Image (cartoon, rainbow, N blue to C red):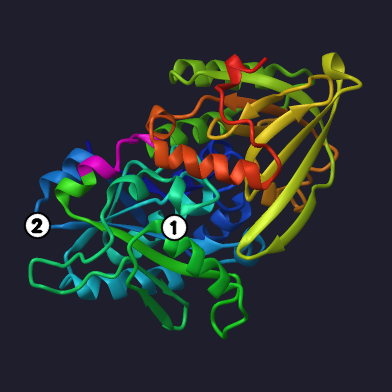
Amino acid sequence: MSYTLNKNQLVQLANGCCFFASGGGGSLTSGLNLLKQYPEDGSTKFATKKEAMADTDAYTLVVAYIGAPDAIENLDTPKAAVQAYNLMNEITGGKIKYIVPVEQGSLSTIVSCVVAEELGLSVVDGDGAGRAVPELTMLTYADTVPMANQKTPEGQIIPAAIIASKDGQKVEMMVSSAETVESMVRPFISSGIAGFDQAAGLAIWLMNSSELNTALPITGTIETSFKLGEYLSSLSPEPSNQNYVNILNFLSNQRFNASWEFVGIMTTPIETTGGGFDTDKIIINGIETFAGVDMHIYALNENLIAWRTDKPYPVIIAPDSICYMTKDGQAFSNADISNSELNIIGQNVGVFALQSRAELTNSKPIMSAFNDVLTTIGYPGGYKPWNKLA
């Protein structure tokens, strides 16, 4: 059934999405910044996939920001994303009534919520991965939605994607695959062209009712993220690690195959930015039962693989999610670690493994994309679920 969330509830949603995003999906700070100008009496409408599909004359569109987290850290307006939506909506004759997050994450989810409130649209409760991902090719949309030679019933050619700046500059992309969009957009927005400085609004994967059915198999992620955010806000600071146990119990009750994998002290990430990506190495110094052991997490915006210095094999591999929070219940992304306001460095943090959605691991193109990226960062060994690594 459809429902609404107000501004305070969207803050809780941002926190829950931040945990599930496997270190990416935009920083928690950037998601909360977008909510600063959200009307105090405003609310965002959410619809189920079934409700959106029943509206057979309407289109659903993926709206997002694309770029390096450092470039979108201080976003306080959804203007670029609104511009991208408006340009695509004009092509359809004003028939886009629903938008859906590209992935799960503080910014990735909240930008859809803010755009929907501003334009009077509904957000479909779901996303393309059940986590955040480094590349568009890792999303269920890429695996199912045709992009080449598409036209509206009126004969209007539909671009595969539109990127826009907040002042209305645009690029319409007439290409045949998400891989081509990916290979063109990131170098373009990082090239220094005026208006596109490492980030842009993105409108992509325009879907009619039948296309939405196959393109969005992962649903209910917004409702689950809100429940987690609400639960996180209820946690009290604990001298022990009880809150990690509490969150693991929550995840189990929500039917996630999850594990609390590590506890330690967060150190300063080793980071480089370029080509629309942030490349990170995050080292957590183990404490208590993990004293003398370090966890090394490697990320391209999102966490992709985790190693422990006492084991000769990785302990979590994408698309399984590598999620973390402080022992007091603060979710954070990789882009938040060095934020002086959140003060994550030096804190006790817990690392969790969440088994990937089957919709990702059962897709050969999606798994090929993950394997390619893992090879890029030095691991050609392929995927195994976290509970089968040994």
Q: What percent of the width, then of the height, locates residue 77? A: 50, 69
Q: What percent of the width, then of the height, locates residue 141? A: 34, 48
Q: Residue at x 62, y 54 (%)?
A: 29
Front-lying residue, 154 or 221: 154
Q: Check disc 1: other Cα within 10 Å, few if <14, some if 14-19, many if 20+.
A: some
Circle on res. 179: 1
Element at label 1: helix
On whether residue 216 falls in the magenta region, the answer is yes
Q: Which residues are magenta?
A: 213-221
Front-lying residue, 348 or 149: 149
Check disc 1 and give the amino acid type: Glu
On whether residue 36 falls in the magenta region, the answer is no
Q: Check disc 2: other Cα within 10 Å, few if <14, some if 14-19, many if 20+.
A: few
Q: Residue at x 45, y 53 (%)?
A: 136
Q: Is residue 370 above or below residue 182?
A: above
Q: Please report whichever mark, 1 or 2, sits nearer to the chain's N-terminal start.
A: 2
Which quadrant of the structure image shows residue 120?
bottom left
Q: Residue at x 35, y 61 (%)?
A: 204
Give the residue number, with chain letter if any, for mark 2. Answer: 57
Whether label 1 touches label 2, CB < 8 Å = no
Instruction: Report the side of 316 relative to 179 (left or right).
Output: right
- Single out the mark in the foreground, 1 or 2: 1
Q: Is residue 54 visible?
A: yes
